[in-house]
Amino acid sequence: MTDHHILGAGVMGLCTAVELARRGATVTVHDPLGLPGPHQCSWWAGGMLAPRCEGETAEEVVVNEGLKAVDWWQAQGAEVTRNGTLVVALGRDRAELDRFARRTTGHSLLSAEEVAETEPLLAGRFSRGLFFAEEAHLDPQAALAALVARAKELGVRFTTDSAAEGSVIDCRGTAARDILPDLRGVKGEMLVLHSPEITLSRPVRLLHPRIPVYIVPRGDGTFMLGATMIESAERNRASVRSVLELLTAAYALHPAFGEAEIVEIGHDARPAFPDNLPRLRHAGGRLCLNGLYRHGYLMAPALARMAADHLLEGRNALLEEALPA
C-alpha cells in the first residue's frame, strides 16, 4: 500500500490526514514546527461554521460544502455548538442588513423583541436582525487538537522531518507560493477578549459598509473578535488601525465590551487564489490542496474528501480547476 506524506499540520493537512487514514491509508504528517500552534493561520480562525452567511460573497460551492462541514467536524470529535448565527446592523446601516438578506438564504427576519429573546444582551439595541438557524461554531484551537487526537487514533504519524517521498500532499498554505505562483496572502487580524459580565450564546455579525465584524463566544466570558481582510501576505504584526477598528465595532455592538480585557491579538495571512476558491492542483511533483481563503474550517473537509477520492479511488475530476459549484 502507498504511504502518503502530508506537508503541513494546519487545518488542511490534518483534515486530509484524517480522511485518508479513516479509509485505511498509511499517513505521515510532516511539519518542521510540530503540531498545530500560533505559527499557523488556522490557529487564529474565528471558528464559525457559517456557510449561509458566507454566501453573501462566496460561491454556491462554499455554502453547499460548508453545510456538510458541521457534521464532519462533529464526527471527528470536535465540540460543535449548533446555536445558529445572529446578524445585526446599527440604525444608520440598516441598508446593509437588507442587502445581506437579499444575498443570502436560510435566514429568518427578527423583530427588535425577537433579537432580544435570541440574545438578551442586545435588548433595545437593534430594531431588526437576521437569524441563521442551521449554522454553528467551534473553538479552532480545540478543534485542531481534536483532529490530532483523531489522526493518532487512526495511526497517523507526525514528524518534524521535512523529507518526504512517494505520494506527497502539499498543505502548506501561503508557504506553497514557491510552487503555486498565483497563490496570494490575505491578512487577517483578530483579538481575544475576556469579560465575565458579557453573555452571548452564538456568533454575532455586526454589518458595516466598510468594516463588518463578528464576535464568537468561546465560553467562560471569552470572545473572539475578528477579522480584517487586507490584501497582504504579511504575517508578523497587527496594525493600530485594525485593532482600533475592531474594538470600536465591539463597543458599538455593546458598550460593555469597552471594559473587556484584551487577552490576545492574533494575525496571519490566509492563502487564496485570484477567485478566492480552493483548488486541488498537481504542481512540483505533488498534489497541492490550497486556497482556503477565509473558509478554512468550512472547506478543508471537502478538499480532504476530494483528495482521498483521487488518491485512493482514482477519481480525477477538476484537479486543475476550482471546486465545482
Image (spheres, rainbow, N blue to C red):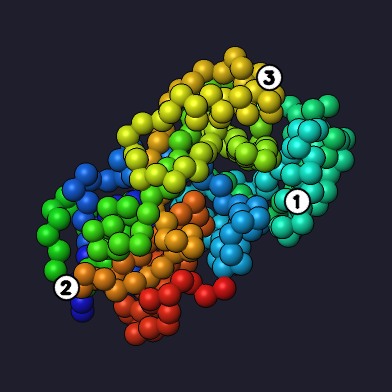
Q: Amino acid at mark 2?
A: Gly
Residue at figure coordinates x 44%, y 46% from the top left: 231
Return the mark for residue 166: 2
Q: Secondary structure at mark 3?
A: helix
Q: Secondary structure at mark 2?
A: loop
The span from disc 1 to disc 3 (Cα, nearest Å) is 26 Å
Q: Secondary structure at mark 1?
A: helix
Residue, disc 1: 99
Residue 5 placement, left or right of 184: left
> In the rendered view of the protein, which quadrant contains the N terminus?
bottom left
What is the x, y in percent for residue 257?
62, 21
Q: Amino acid at mark 3?
A: Pro
Tell me, yes or no, if residue 186 can be seen here. Answer: yes
Residue, disc 3: 255
Above or below, comparing residue 306 to residue 92 in the picture: below
What is the x, y in percent for residue 306?
42, 73
Tell me, yes or no, if residue 155 can be seen here. Answer: no
What is the x, y in percent for residue 55?
64, 58
Q: Nearer the viewer, mark 1 or mark 3?
A: 1
Residue nearest the observer in this picture, 252 or 50: 252
Residue 316 placement, left or right of 97: left
What is the x, y in percent for residue 146?
40, 49
Neighbour tally class for label 3: few under 14, some 14-19, many 20 plus, Cα within 10 Å: few
Q: Amino acid at mark 1?
A: Arg
Please identify the quarter of the rendering in which residue 291 is found: bottom left
Residue nearest the observer in this picture, 238 or 112: 238
Callout 1–callout 3 Cβ contact below 8 Å: no
